[in-house]
Image (cartoon, grey):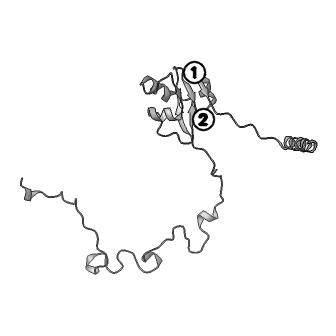
Amino acid sequence: MKLNDLRDNPGARKSRVRVGRGIGSGVGKTAGRGQKGQKSRSGVSIAGFEGGQMPLHMRLPKRGFNNVFRKYFAEVNLGTLQIAVDAGKINADTVLDGAALVAAGVISHAREGVRLLAKGTLTTPLKLKLHGASAAAKAAVEAAGGSLELPAEKPAPLSRDEQKVARASARAAKAKA
């Protein structure tokens, strides 16, 4: 084999189609765009347009709700934590929070907090400081001899009657002062 014999495999390099170069080229005249009309011209943006009829996405009823204040949690299973402990990625004596789990490579990023789920089994006692946990996961951590610290939950909102009583007592306290 010589340098002048080197070449690409057949079909490896394909030249682009040059449209609108006469009827003999196979893509002449209308350049593969059919005939006339809006779609044969450039700059067409009519996805979903139905010729003046109300488009399907506007005819159908809208359902559901997207909460813009929703928090996205990174999820960790008990089995994943146990595998990380067995592999030596996690030191069971330290307090594990989102930053420690990211540093150990258990999760890629902590997002807006870490939530513990109960898939798998946990045999090592761990001290966890997370943003949330399922009831089964919390019970499994405590059964293994570990502890789970969660942020303080918000108090339940007051009912209308309780709100009225609270306002009345506030007014009474203000009137006395």
Task: Kindly identify the residue that appears in the image at 28 percent across and 80 percent down.
Answer: 23
As drawn, the residue found furthest toward the front would be 177
- Closer-to-camera residue (127/79): 127
Which quarter of the picture shows residue 59? bottom right
Query: In front here: 29 or 172?
Result: 172
Give above or below for 173 relative to 43: above
Given the current orientation, which residue lies at the most extreme left position? Answer: 2
Residue bearing the label numbered 1: 146
Give the residue type that dot 1 points to: Gly
Q: x, y percentage for residue 163? A: 84, 43
* Apparent side of residue 86 relative to residue 138 in the rendered image (left or right): left
Q: What mark, if any, has residue 131 been given in the picture?
A: 2
Q: Is residue 128 visible?
A: yes
Residue 12 place in picture, x, y as percent: 22, 59
**Mark count:** 2
Counting residues from the start of the chain, the first of labels 2 and 1 encountered is 2
- Name the secondary structure under disc 1: loop
SS state under label 2: loop
Work out whether residue 149 or residue 49 is closer to the camera in this orientation and state it.
Answer: 149
Q: Residue at x 49, y 33 (%)?
A: 101
What residue lies at 25% left-to-right and 67% top-to-bottom?
15
